[in-house]
Image (cartoon, helix red, strand yellow):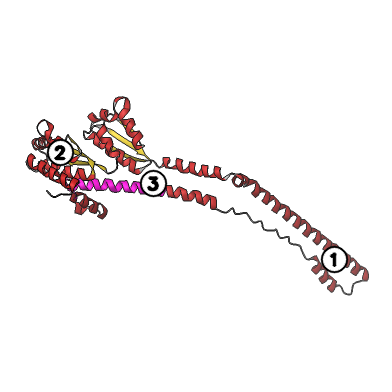
Amino acid sequence: MTENKIEDQPEDIRKLAETLKASGLAASDTDAIEKARASIGAEKVVQKAQDLGNYFEGKSKGAEEAPVEKETVSEPKVEVNNDQDQESSEKDDNENSEPVEEKESAETSEESQDVEEKAEETAEQESTEEINDNEEIEESSEPEQEDQPEDEQKEDIEGANLEQPMEEELSYQLKIPGERVAVLVGTDGENKSLIEKEAEVRIHVTKDGEIDIYGEDGLKLYTSLEIVRAIGRGFNPKYALELLKTDYVLDIIRLKDIAGKSQKTMERLKGRVIGKAGRSRENIERLTNCYISVYGKTIGIIGETVDVSLAHQAIAMLLQGSMHKTVFTFLEKKRKEIMYGQEG
């Protein structure tokens, strides 16, 4: 199997993978790259959830602060023919006409002025009524929003923020061995329900081992993913739930990265870690305060970050051929350094 190289990865994944491998939390480049991708993916999920919350919070505030714009109604202009000018011009053209005709022209001009004044008054009255109607329409459309108590408006906004993330629910998919499905579910679904309650997620399980995990909190969703992975790698659900604690991590050592395709070599390596009657594994667990599971083609470790790193080093020494006595002496020395700050 060709191993992925850390130096070929994008910069963010490469840096985190190098750190994981240097600290002993990853047995190989492939393991380090896989852990780095999972960690960065979780950070992006959290960022997305935070951006989503900020978006709806800003949208709610914008709705409260947005000013209400009223329509402006322009006053209609009334065009009136200037009959007076026309009459004046006719009067100039008929200066030599008879007095009777001049008198009739003057009377016609006065009547035209009266008509103009009445038309202007009518136009102004219609314009005023139209403006009043528009104002009444605007007022009738606003009362529900203006008269609504502030407490009720806050409840509506909070309700919208709580309901919206459900539409953007996050999810993870993974597969575990079919024989571990029953362990994950538990008697009458007890184990599955406990994980859902403690991690605040929903888990859908198929008989073939296909697992779908749904949740709104990115960090809790990732933690539940690690719990399910741990159960799939042979851990008792009771120990897997320890991952809910702060600073507890899951480390997976892939034996095929060391043994290759040789099944015989893989079984020999597993035997070295387990030891006669399981005593080797028990000693490593005791000296590191970790839980160790040797299952299939992997070795899993659960514990606090520092302890997991120490257990990983001890197992790596056994896989590379170190004697059990040498490994246990190494662990006892390291344990004393951690507890008492001594070098010997």
Q: CA distance from mark 3 to mark 1?
A: 79 Å
Of helix, strand and loop, which one carries label 1? helix
Q: Which mark is residue 109?
A: 1
Residue at left 21%, top 47%? 32
Q: Quadrant of residue 292?
A: top left
Residue 61 location in percent, x, y?
A: 50, 50
**Above or below, comparing residue 228 to residue 15 in the picture:** above
Marks 3, 1: nearer the viewer: 3
Q: Residues within 10 Å of mark 1 (few under 14, many from 20)?
A: some
Q: Range of the magenta residues? A: 23-52
**Residue picked out by circle 3:** 49
Q: Position of residue 10 (x, y in %)?
A: 25, 54
Q: Residues within 10 Å of mark 2 (few under 14, many from 20)?
A: many
Q: Can residue 25 be found in the magenta stretch?
A: yes
Report x, y in % for residue 329: 10, 43
Question: CA gap, disc 1 to disc 2?
Answer: 119 Å
The residue located at (41%, 47%) in the rendering is 52
